[in-house]
Image (tube, rainbow, N blue to C red):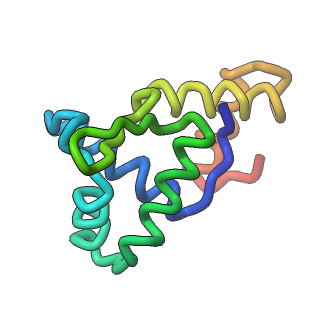
Amino acid sequence: MTFTHGSLENEILNAVWTMEENGINAKDISVSEVLSHINNNGNIRAYTTVKTVMDRLVDKDLLKREKIGKKFCYYSVESRETMAQNAINKLAGQFFNNDVRSLMRAVEKQCTGLKV
């Protein structure tokens, strides 16, 4: 599973997670639903762009796709919390010798405006 993705991929993942967290059934999360969610947040995107990126997220194993009737529906492979935890662990491994506490101290310093 890859942890790097672009800003539109993040928008889409966040839209899917938000819909799932709000109780929307995975069978109801289509490209149109995601597009509507993203466009309601002020970012106007084209249907074909969102569809292409969602299919790439399927290829990256970040979303799953299921054909229901005539449309494809999507759902997340991992929860927002699990993906965040995985990203934190990867970051700790890359820069802090797998020491999450050191990473958290660096984050805390960053939040308080101190130099790391």
Residue placed furthest toward the front? 70
Left or right of residue 110, residue 45 in this image:
left
Residue placed furthest toward the left? 23
Q: Residue at x 30, y 43 (%)?
A: 73
Left or right of residue 98, residue 88 in this image:
left
Left or right of residue 70, residue 8 in this image:
right
Q: Residue at x 57, y 34 (%)?
A: 61
The percent position of residue 67, horizontal first and vertical second, equals: 32, 39
User: Compared to 4, does 101 lie above or below?
Assistant: above
Quarter placement of the N terminus:
top right
The percent position of residue 46, horizontal first and vertical second, equals: 39, 77
In which quarter of the view is residue 12 placed? bottom left
Q: Residue at x 47, y 71 (%)?
A: 49
The percent position of residue 52, horizontal first and vertical second, equals: 51, 62
User: Compared to 21, does 116 lie above or below?
Assistant: below
Q: Residue at x 28, y 73 (%)?
A: 39
In which quarter of the view is residue 78 placed? top left
Q: Nearer the viewer, residue 44 or 26?
A: 26
The percent position of residue 100, horizontal first and vertical second, equals: 68, 22
